[in-house]
Amino acid sequence: MATTMKLSKIISSATEITADMSPESGGGAGGSATLRRRVLTATLFFAAIAVPFFFLNNTAYPFLLLRGSSSMENEGGNLGRILKEAAMEDKSVIITTLNEAWATPGSVFDLFLESFRIGNQTHGLVDHLVVVALDQKAYNRCLELHPHCFLLTTGDVDFSGGEKYFMSPDYLKMMWRRILFLRSVLQLGYNFVFTDADIMWFRDPFPRFYKDADFQISCDRFNGNSLDSNNCPNGGFTYVKSNKRTIEFYKLWYLSRKSYPGLHDQDVLNMIKHQTSITKIGLKMRFLSTTYFGGFCEISKDLNQVCTMHANCCVGLDRKVHDLKLMLEDWRKYVSLPVAMKRSKPSSWRVPQVCLETFHQAPLKRDAPKGKKGN
Ligand SMILES: *[C@@H]1O[C@H](CO)[C@@H](O)[C@H](O)[C@H]1NC(C)=O
């Protein structure tokens, strides 16, 4: 954590100065005057810089200062225990986040779980899903439906109050909180597939992931080259291996928010994805094709190939839910077709429907930096 690091650096430089004042290094009357001056300098320095720095940061980011290490996130070993229970043999978990609005009966979370039930061989994957609830009501609803729920408390920010308006201060905090949390998961040694809950799972994505990549991410639009950082990534779906490079990368990503105030994680990713610092870290990044990992921005056209579909490029929770339901209907219809029909006559989606309209009526949001709009 930058804050903690800076503070400890200041403290340690103050300590160094103090250490310098040991009797052996002083000596004599002149020495003691120098000594006093040094004590004064050190004290003033600490009081003038370190203390306000501490309080300033502590007020602005109360949870950040204390959440530097994975052990803080893993208070009481709770997170570690839940991850262990949910993990696959290779220590991979599937993670989603949930707030009250999305957890309401009939809303996004129900549809998300339903997709695993009706998807092709996705049912068993639910056993490896960890639901990170951002408020108490979402947590309670999770406990009713699912065995692996974790309540992520944040102190000052209330994420529960209905739908978080896209790019509002609370929305931004929620997004950044997520990055910080995912870093802790990596630090605890777990690989993860992070998935927004408005992503429907129709097929097991693991066979489609690149074996040699550290960090793979879905795209709003895919240009055909999985190595090209000019793709428009969407942070709603990522597969990240736990290793030194990814932990370092999440650290960089999180710290970079300070360089781009007001931007959310995904926009900042767009800023840093080309940077030399990523090359320095040695992170192997891949962009996932919309052929398998589609969305409303760019649909996965072939139902014979689709793994996941994301309700991205959609403004408003009601519209999202409407089109997601339609999407599940389309899938059910496809599944019920005889095999020969599935192969011969490619089925297509009826989505986006209401999402499309609203999206084009929202020029402001469309103009937002290549991102997952309304998400
Ligand atoms: C489901 O998966 C199995 C095994 O991969 C495959 O044989 C079958 O054709 C799939 N069904 C659909 C609808 O994709």
Image (cartoon, rainbow, N blue to C red):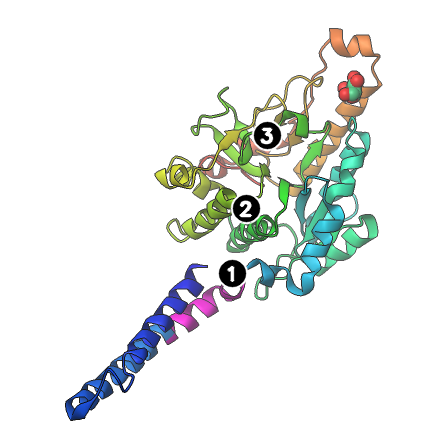
The span from disc 1 to disc 2 (Cα, nearest Å) is: 27 Å
Provide residue 362's location: percent of width, then percent of height: 52, 36
Indicate whether 319 appears above or below 247. above
Which residue type carries mark 2?
Phe
Indicate whether 162 appears above or below 297. below
**Disc 1: which residue:** 68
Which residue type carries mark 3?
Glu
Pointer 2 or 3: first along the chain? 2
Whether 66 is among the magenta residues is yes
Callout 3: helix, strand or loop?
helix
Q: Quadrant of the C terminus?
A: top right
**Disc 2: which residue:** 166
Whether 50 is among the magenta residues is no
Provide residue 82's location: percent of width, then percent of height: 73, 53
- Dominant secondary structure of the magenta stretch? helix
Pointer 3 or 1: first along the chain? 1
**In front: label 1 or label 2:** 1
**Disc 3: which residue:** 357
Callout 1: helix, strand or loop?
loop
Instruction: Return the residue nearer the eye: 23 or 41.
Output: 23
